[in-house]
Image: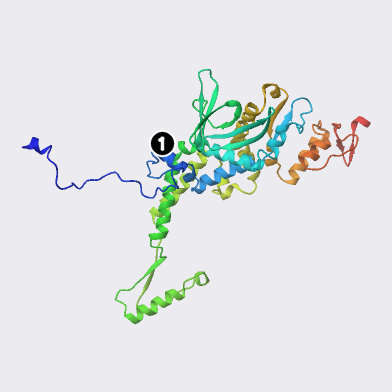
Amino acid sequence: MKLLNLFRAKTTPEAQSRPQASVGQLFDGLDDPDLLAFMRNGGGTASGAYVTASKALQNMALLRCVTLISESIGMLPLNLIERGDEKKYATTHPLYRLLKSRPNQWQTAYEFKSLMQLRLLLHGNAYARIIRSRDQIIQLIPIDPALVTPKLDDQWNMQYHYQRKNGETLILPASEIFHLRDLSDDGIVGLSRVKLAREAIGIALQAEKAAARLFKNGVMAGGALSSPDKLSDEAYTKLQASVEAKAGADNAGRWMILEEGLKAEQFANTAADAQHIENRNHQIEEIARAMGVPRPLLMMDDTSWGSGIEQLGIFFVQYSLQHWFTVWEQATERSLLTPEECGKYFIKFNERALLRGTLKDQADFFTKALGSGGQQPFMTANQVRELLDMSKDKSKHADELGTPLIKDKNVTTNPAKN
């Protein structure tokens, strides 16, 4: 009888848990890139948050990290420089204008570099289609990283499979793609920092949701009025009117007159509230650590501002941006210069724009660069003027290194003329 019961149709459905779609995961349509990422990765984290590149940017700590790095890369000049003793800008080369001012028909150099760096930080890869005319690069067209798959063929040549909007796949050689990649475990595809840190980001997003729910549904009263006896209707009405009359910023700090034995009891922050704030601060540290940005630049530490701001800026350039400078410089030389041109030119960011310091610091540096105090000069007058965005001095010796100036008491002499 029990064996037959195994095959007998059940007339009443059992009450059992069934897998349900995650509540609150909305997509703009079938072409939403978040939908594709959700289908590929499952979308979830241990914290229950759904983390993709666009969702992650809703966290303020990550948004600050990404915008800080992307804007810094976008505003710094990326120069094409001729090799040799003079090392002057290659202004006559078509690539100089492309990197300096106009990479394509609708973007400025700042917008192009910021967008590429943003995608590089979020996806681990950034791509741009190289458009040539008569063997000269005339445009760099950004491509969505979700539509590009880099692969190595059997001859160890890099190929890029680009999926067009009509669904067609276009196979492009490495000579037609400008590829920026973050750290990689295979040398082909860069690792996405958002994916690697998605658990930390997920916890941060859930902590923000918890804080939002507290403001929406939690009791935000500052205290309570208690009475040993039940209040009469008249006393309750008077008390309610008195409380409402004392509300607002203009009445902050004023005392209330209590009647009928009422006692005021102020609510204090609980240990759970303090732990919630501590957890949120810890997640900010985790995100800052993943993106390589110092905590003070996320507006976390007031004590690091003031006299330490100069050292903080140097730290940010050396340990946060220098990695990205190298990625950009070597990728542009690999993809945008021919092997013959690599022997004549090199590409470099001008990071001095972030390290200028105060006017006093600049004045001290430039006087030493020109040979003040008996030091061997290493800059000409026109090189100093160029760094200050000033027009060139057309005098005879403005492009020549001077001789060390020795300061003797109140008289400055040039030993070469004595």
Name the residue at 64% across, 41% down: 74
Seen from the viewer's position, the closer of residues 300 and 338 is 338
Judge from the rendering whether residue 324 lies leftward or rightward of residue 346; answer left or right: left
- From this viewpoint, is residue 395 visible? yes
Q: Is residue 219 above or below residue 158?
A: below
Q: From this viewpoint, which residue is outermost toward the top?
A: 155
The residue indicated by pointer 1 is: 40
Residue 329 on image: x %, y % = 64, 31
Name the residue at 74% across, 43% down: 361
Seen from the viewer's position, the closer of residues 179 and 177 is 177
Seen from the viewer's position, the closer of residues 376 and 155 is 155
Quadrant of residue 92 within the rendered picture: top right
Query: Which residue type does callout 1 highlight?
Result: Arg
- Estimate how packed mark 1 is, as few (under 14), some (14 to 19) or many (20 or more) residues with alpha carbons within 10 Å: few
Residue 131 on image: x %, y % = 64, 32
Residue 56 on image: x %, y % = 48, 44
Count of picture labels: 1
Q: Quadrant of the C terminus?
A: top right
Name the residue at 70% across, 21% down: 340
Residue 130 on image: x %, y % = 62, 32
State the SS at label 1.
helix
- From this viewpoint, is residue 258 visible? no
Quadrant of residue 117 within the rendered picture: top right
Q: Quadrant of the N terminus?
A: top left
